[in-house]
Structures are given as structure tokens and as C-alpha cells.
Image (cartoon, grey):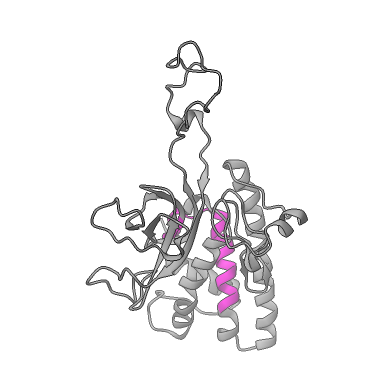
């Protein structure tokens, strides 16, 4: 079945941009193919970041790099900032960390001097032996994404092809969760698995990026670029509304007193705040990212 290859998506973007060209392959060396290749991956990563798309959700164990307590063997003990206990490698296929789940609930025991039940071993309520995922809501833990020069990438890594690593540092995740998992948006390269609204938004975004370099009439190209950006924004807004009905996510409504309260904060309860430290997301909601031409919503 046709229509599910990157070349098909690229041809669709060419058509939407009003360019009269039939693309043989996205890597055929033609002028349009070269322009598309320069914009394709960056546009894809940017669009993946602006919403918690269901088709790009992934949960995986993180690789421990350092334990500041010194209790984990075969890892370092230096964790930047002295604010977190553990440091983990950033997943190489991650585009955005959504949240770090807290581990199962741990009872602190009875408060000293409090009333003790007749049978200390009796549960306070029945059915407590069910799986935590069925009884307890998954809660995100505090974390921050940063860069650390202390732990170089593995030997043999092709630095130009592995995300989050460089000759001088690597991207890491800091948190207090032991044996942490990560829920994140991964770089989903396969159009056959994309949500239909995501594809519509991506085609429009890609078209807006290629229309000026490939258009003979630059004035007309600017108008087409503006139109495609509007299409992309509309698709993102619609996708967020549908996604909110399909999953359990936080609202992205802006509340002034919350903006003021968290002004200047770099993270809280789920990762990064919005740009400027205000209006960030509590509990793993959407980022206040923007796409070219204005806010994504």
C-alpha cells in the first residue's frame, strides 16, 4: 500500500507548497530533495515536541550513570548540582521527556504517638493486595534534563549520529528515583504509524519550510508559507483536543496566579517549565513550545 514512506510525505509537502515537481526519492539528489532533506528531520522533531502525541509515546528503563550515595556499583558518584541523587543517560531516541514515574507507594508507618490499631498487621482497608497500577494513580517525580561532561559516551559511538552526546558532554536526566523509568516522546520516523492529524500538521509544516527556497515567486511563496503554518496550527489544536479525550493528561490552560507563583522556576513536578520559567507544565502536560510563525496553539 502506497503513501506511507517518507518520500510520499515529502511529495505531499511539495504538492501543498504549490511546487510543480515529481519527487522520485527523498534522496535522489534533485534540488527539491536536497531542500527537503535539510528541513525534514528538524521539522519532525519540532512537531513531535509540541504535543504529547500518542503514536510517539514510549516508556523505557533509564541507564544509570551516577549515584551520589555511592551505593550503586560500576557507576560514578558525581551528580551535577547536588540536588538529586541519581543521574541517567538521556534516551538516544528521545525527543522530549514527558515525566519520570515515581515508584510504587511506600508506607512510612504509623506516626509516633499515634493510635495503634488492635492488630498492627491488619490492613486499614480491604483489597490492598491489588497491583499498584490498578489502585494508585501514576505520579511523576521531580527531574531535570541537563548536560554533564563527567561521563563521556561509550567508546565507538558515532557522535554525529547519536542524539545527546558530543566530544565534550552528554545530555542526562537527574532525579531522585532509583531504578528509574522514563515516559517520553520518541523520534518516530515511520509515517505508517503516525496519527492522521500529526501527518497533516507535519506535511503543512514541511511545506512551509520548503516553499520559499523552491518557489519562483517569493511573494506568493510567503503567502503559501503563512497558509501552511495556519494549517499546521489548526491540526495541532484539534489533535490536542482529541488526545485529551483519549488519555489522562493535564490541562494546558494558562492560569495567571500559577504563572506568577512559578515565575523563574526551572522545573517542578514533571520537568521543565515553559520558556522564561513561567507557565510550565505540572504533571506532565504539554510544553509551551512554539512553531515557526507563532505559538503552536
Q: Quadrant of the N terminus?
A: bottom left
Q: Is residue 121 visible?
A: yes
Q: Which residue is at 60% across, 59% downward?
A: 287
How many numbered badges does the structure rendering display?
A: 0
Residue furthest out toward the front? 113
Residue 25 x %, y %:
39, 74
| Front one among 64 and 80 | 80
Residue 122 falls left or right of residue 285 = left
Location of residue 167 by image quarter: bottom left
Identity of the residue drawn at 35% across and 78% down: 168
Q: Residue at x 45, y 59 (%)?
A: 191
> What main secondary structure does the magenta stretch of the protein show?
helix
The correct choice, above or below, for 71 with respect to 187 in the image is: above
Q: Which residue is pictured at 49% across the width and 71% down the height? A: 11
Quarter placement of the C terminus = bottom right
Coordinates of residue 142 in the picture (x, y in percent): 51, 52
Between 126 and 183, the one nearer to me in the picture: 126
In the figure, 247 relative to 88: above or below? above
Write down the region rendered in magenta. Answer: 185-209
Question: Where does residue 132 sit, x and y in percent of width and height?
Answer: 45, 31
The furthest residue to the right? 256
| Residue 58 is at least partly visible in this image | no
Residue 196 in magenta stretch:
yes
Position in image of residue 128 (x %, y %): 46, 21
Q: Is residue 64 magenta?
A: no
Q: Say above or below: 118 vs 158.
A: above
Amino acid at each position: 500500500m502506497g503513501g506511507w514512506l517518507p518520500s510520499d510525505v515529502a511529495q505531499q509537502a511539495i504538492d501543498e507548497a504549490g511546487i510543480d515537481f515529481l519527487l522520485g526519492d527523498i534522496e535522489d539528489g534533485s534540488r527539491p530533495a536536497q531542500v527537503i532533506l535539510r528541513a525534514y528531520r528538524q521539522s519532525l522533531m519540532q512537531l513531535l515536541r509540541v504535543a504529547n502525541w500518542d503514536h510517539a509515546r514510549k516508556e523505557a528503563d533509564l541507564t544509570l550513570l551516577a549515584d551520589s550515595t555511592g551505593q550503586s556499583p560500576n557507576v560514578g558518584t558525581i551528580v551535577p548540582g547536588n540536588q538529586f541523587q541519581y543521574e541517567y543517560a538521556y534516551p538516544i531516541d528521545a525527543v522530549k521527556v514527558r515525566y519520570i514515574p515515581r515508584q510504587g507507594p511506600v508506607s512510612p508507618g504509623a506516626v509516633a504517638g499515634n493510635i495503634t490499631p488492635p492488630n498492627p498487621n491488619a490492613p486499614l482497608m480491604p483489597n490492598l493486595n491489588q497491583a499498584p497500577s490498578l489502585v494508585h494513580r501514576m505520579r511523576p517525580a521531580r527531574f531535570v534534563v541537563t548536560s554533564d561532561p563527567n561521563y563521556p559516551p561509550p567508546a565507538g559511538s558515532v557522535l554525529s549520529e547519536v542524539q545527546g552526546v558530543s566530544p565534550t558532554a552528554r545530555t542526562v536526566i537527574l532525579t531522585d528515583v532509583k531504578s528509574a523509568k522514563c515516559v517520553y516522546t520518541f523520534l518516530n520516523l515511520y509515517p505508517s504509524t503516525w496519527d492522521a492529524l500529526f501527518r497533516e500538521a507535519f506535511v503543512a509544516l514541511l511545506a512551509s519550510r520548503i516553499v520559499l527556497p523552491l518557489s519562483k515567486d517569493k511573494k506568493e511563496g510567503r503567502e503559501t508559507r503563512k497558509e501552511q503554518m495556519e494549517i499546521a496550527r489548526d491540526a495541532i489544536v484539534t489533535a490536542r483536543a482529541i488526545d485529551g479525550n483519549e488519555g489522562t493528561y493535564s490541562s494546558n490552560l494558562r492560569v495567571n496566579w500559577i504563572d506568577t507563583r512559578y515565575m523563574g522556576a526551572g522545573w517542578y513536578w514533571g520537568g521543565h517549565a515553559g520558556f522564561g520559567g513561567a507557565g510550565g507544565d505540572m504533571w506532565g502536560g504539554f510544553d509551551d513550545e512554539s512553531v515557526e510563525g507563532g505559538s503552536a496553539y
